[in-house]
Image (cartoon, rainbow, N blue to C red):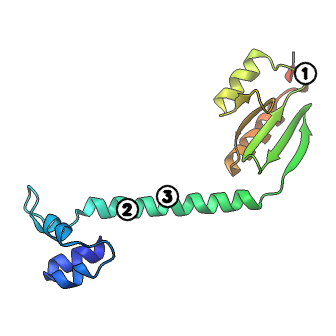
C-alpha cells in the first residue's frame, strides 16, 4: 500500500503495475479521487495494517514462549495445579466440587469448567500462571472442596 501510494504521488503507472498485486483496474480505482478529493490508500488503512502487524508479531512471540514452556504439576492447598502446554491450558484439579463462592471466584479469574478434562482451566499465558498461583495461595485448604 505504501509503494502504491508512492507511485500514485509520482503518477508512475508503470512502476505501479510492477507491484505484486497491481492491475490496471486497481490503478484506475485508487487513482480516482475520494469524496474529499484524495487519491491512493487512506492513511488510516496504513495505520490499521501497522497495528495488525504489531498485534500478530506479539501473538507469535507469545505462542513461541508458550511452546517452549515445560509442563509442570504441583499441589497448592490441596488443589493440583497443572501447566499443560500441549493443550495450551492452565488447569486446576480440585479433589471434589469446590464451594459456590470458590467457583464464582474461579469464573471471575477467567477459569471455566472443562467436563472433558475434569478441571477448571484457562488459556496458558504468563498472566494465567500468575493468577492461578495467587488464587491457590489465597485459598484456604479447608475451603478447597465441600
Q: Which residue is mark 1?
A: 142
Residue under label 3: 55
Q: Is residue 78 above or below residue 52?
A: above
User: Which residue: 87% across, 49% down?
Assistant: 72
Dot 1, crowdedness within 10 Å: few (<14), some or many (≥20)? few
CA distance for labels 2 and 1: 52 Å
Q: Work out whether residue 11 or residue 37 is closer to the camera in this orientation and state it.
A: 11
Question: Between 41 and 102, which is closer to the camera in this rendering?
Answer: 41
Q: For residue 142, what is the image quadrant? A: top right
Q: On the picture, is 45 further left or further right than 142?
A: left
SS of the residue at dot 1?
helix
Q: Nearer the viewer, mark 1 or mark 3?
A: 3
Distance CA(mark 2)–CA(mark 3): 10 Å
Name the residue tied to disc 2: 49
Q: Are marks 2 and 1 in contact (CB under 8 Å)?
A: no
| Percent of width and height locating residue 107 | 67, 27
Nearer to us in this view, 53 or 109: 53
Q: Which residue: 17% across, 67% down?
A: 25
Is 18 on the left or on the right of 55, as rendered?
A: left
Residue at 69%, 21% (x, y): give it.
104
Q: Which comes sooner in the sequence, label 2 or label 3?
A: 2
Residue 77 in sight in this render: no
Q: Earlier in the sequence, mark 2 or mark 1?
A: 2
Q: Secondary structure at mark 3?
A: helix
Q: Nearer the observer, disc 2 or disc 1?
A: 2
Q: Is residue 142 above or below residue 126?
A: above
The tag earlier along the polypeptide, 1 or 3, is 3
Amino acid at each position: 500500500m505504501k509503494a502504491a501510494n508512492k507511485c500514485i504521488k509520482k503518477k508512475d503507472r508503470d512502476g505501479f503495475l510492477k507491484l505484486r498485486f497491481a492491475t490496471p483496474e486497481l490503478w484506475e480505482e485508487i487513482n480516482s479521487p475520494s469524496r474529499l478529493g484524495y487519491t491512493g490508500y487512506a492513511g488510516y488503512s496504513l495505520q490499521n495494517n501497522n497495528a495488525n502487524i504489531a498485534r500478530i508479531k506479539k501473538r507469535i512471540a507469545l505462542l513461541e514462549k508458550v511452546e517452549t514452556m515445560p509442563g509442570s504439576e504441583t499441589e497448592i492447598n490441596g488443589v493440583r495445579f497443572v501447566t499443560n502446554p500441549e493443550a495450551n491450558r492452565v488447569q486446576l484439579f480440585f479433589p471434589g466440587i469446590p464451594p459456590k463462592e470458590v467457583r464464582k471466584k474461579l469464573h471471575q479469574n477467567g477459569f471455566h469448567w472443562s467436563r472433558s478434562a475434569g478441571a477448571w482451566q484457562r488459556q496458558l499465558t504468563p498472566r494465567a500462571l500468575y493468577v492461578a498461583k495467587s488464587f491457590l495461595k489465597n485459598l484456604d485448604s479447608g475451603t478447597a472442596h465441600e
